[in-house]
Structures are given as structure tokens and as C-alpha cells.
Amino acid sequence: MEVLIRENTEIGCLLGAKIIARVVREKPDAVLGLATGRTPLRLYQELIRLHRDEGLDFSRVTTFNLDEYVGLPATHDQSYRWFMRENFFRHINIDQKRTHVPDGTAKDLHAECRGYEQRIADAGGIDIQLLGLGRNGHIGFNEPTGSLRSRTWIKILSEQTLRDNSAVFGSFDSMPKHAITMGIGTILDARRCLLLAFGPAKVRAVEHMVEGPLSAICPGSALQLHPRATVILDENAAAGLRYADHYRWIDQHKLDWQKHR
Ligand code: F6R
């Protein structure tokens, strides 16, 4: 796992955008795995700027989002399909038909999960998967104790996740309690993973993910198994890491070809 500690969220997000932009430049028909939430917002803004000011071309890019709430149609302003359209897709030249978000309103949710896996496979697999980290260590909506080999499935959201995300729904009770999410096995199949975590609220989850034992109690720790996982943190999220100086040392002594790949 490559751990990159940056001064603040702004610098961390610019670096994340740079990494994704590079993937798109090197492979114009790249398949991007995307995340929602507060963490990647600034990264999306930077990708939009790179599109607008530097011609970063998304016309041949395909995307697959990690997750969607069960029961929320694309027209609901808290659905992840809505989030992606408002915060990213409508500002770039992506072909909407190439953007995929699980359908939380599908009549047969199991068939939707199987179909989502198939669509990822048909697209040739994910080149780079962007991830955030839940306070309880979740990635996607894979909550603690879920199988580390899971494929796209339906998950019951934990109470902690509901509390963290319920503000935008007005109340805890009006928030969907289930989601379709790529499984951990699906995420680990991506050729590269890029996880961002910022702020003091993430400190314990980061500690467990990076330095704790590989355990379903912290789904993010599954990234320890990934051959090419990059984690970008700000100083606050990195505050609990025992080996922070080691990660900084590694970061400072990279050979040119290893830098900001
Ligand atoms: C979002 C997702 C979640 C979030 C995580 C962090 O698609 O899959 O795992 O990345 O809950 O959320 P924020 O960024 O809002 O702290």
C-alpha cells in the first residue's frame, strides 16, 4: 500500500485528480470506478477544471460507481446517480450511456447486482477505482464483517453510516437503510485502487486500514491485499499512524518513475 500524506484536503484532492487525469490521458478509453460522498468533491472539481482548461477528454471513458441507495430513483436529489450528474458528469464531455450507477429501484435487485458485475466485466474491468473511507472502515457500502470476497450485493447500512449520512435526508428515519454496493472482491479486482481520507473523524479507520490486521471488521483493510493501492491522507487523518515517518521517507525517496504515477 502506498501511503501519501499531504498537508490538507486541497492538496490531497489535487494529487488524486492528477493521478486519475494521467490514467485518462494514457488510456483515453479508460474504465473509472467512482465514489460519491464529501471526500471526492474537490477532486471532481479539479477534473472538471482540467477538462475545461486543459482539454482532458472523457468522451471515450466509461465509469462505474460503487453504490446506490435501494429505493431511490435517479430523480431523487440524494441518489448517487443525481450526485454524479450534478457534481461531475454534466460538467464534462462524457457519454452518459457510458456512465453506470447501480439501479436501486430495480424490481429484481439480485439480477441488478449480477448484471452490474457483468457490465464491469464486459467493459474490460476497472482501471482505477476511486474510494472514500467510512468512519467505521467501510469501503463502498461494505460494512464491518461483510465478506472480504463479496461481489456486488445488497447491504444493510450500519447505524453509524446512517447517522453519518442522515443529515442530508432531513432525518434518520427518512433515510434508506439498504444499498447496492460493489463487493470487496469487485473492488479488489480493479487494476488500481485510489482511496482518499481526510479529517480527524477518519483517524481510527485509517489506522486500522493501513496498519491494523487484515480483518472484515475494517473492510478498508482488504486493500492491504491489493497489488496497487494508493492512499492519500491529510495530516489529520494520518495522525494515528505509527509509521507515518516511514511513509513520508518513502514518499521523499522515490525514483522519478515512481512519482505520482
Ligand atoms: C460513497 C461510498 C462511501 C463513502 C464513505 C465516505 O460512494 O461508497 O464508502 O466513500 O462513506 O464518505 P464521505 O466521503 O462523505 O466521508
Image (cartoon, rainbow, N blue to C red):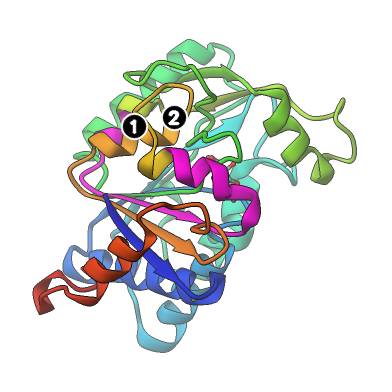
Say if 63 sits above or below 239 in the image.
above
Give me the disc on residue 25. Answer: none
Q: Would you name the residue on which mark 1 appears?
A: 222
Residue, x 63% and y 56% (percent of image)? Answer: 200
**Quadrant of image for the C terminus:** bottom left
Residue 96: image location, x then y, percent? 46, 52
Magenta region: 186-208
Direction from residue 177 to residue 10 in the image, left or right = left
As helix, strand or loop, the secondary structure at mark 2 comes to helix
Question: How many badges with numbers are in the image?
Answer: 2
Q: Could you tell whether 13 is left or right of 165 in the image?
A: left
> Could you tell me if the residues under marks 1 and 2 are in contact, i.e. CB atoms within 8 Å?
yes
The crowd level at tag 1 (other Cα within 10 Å; few <14, some 14-19, many 20+) is: many
Corner quadrant of residue 91: bottom right
Q: Quadrant of ligand 1?
A: top right
| Residue furthest out toward the bottom | 53
Q: Position of residue 249 (x, y in %)?
A: 26, 70
Residue 59 percent coordinates (x, y): 33, 64
The residue that mark 2 highlights is: 219
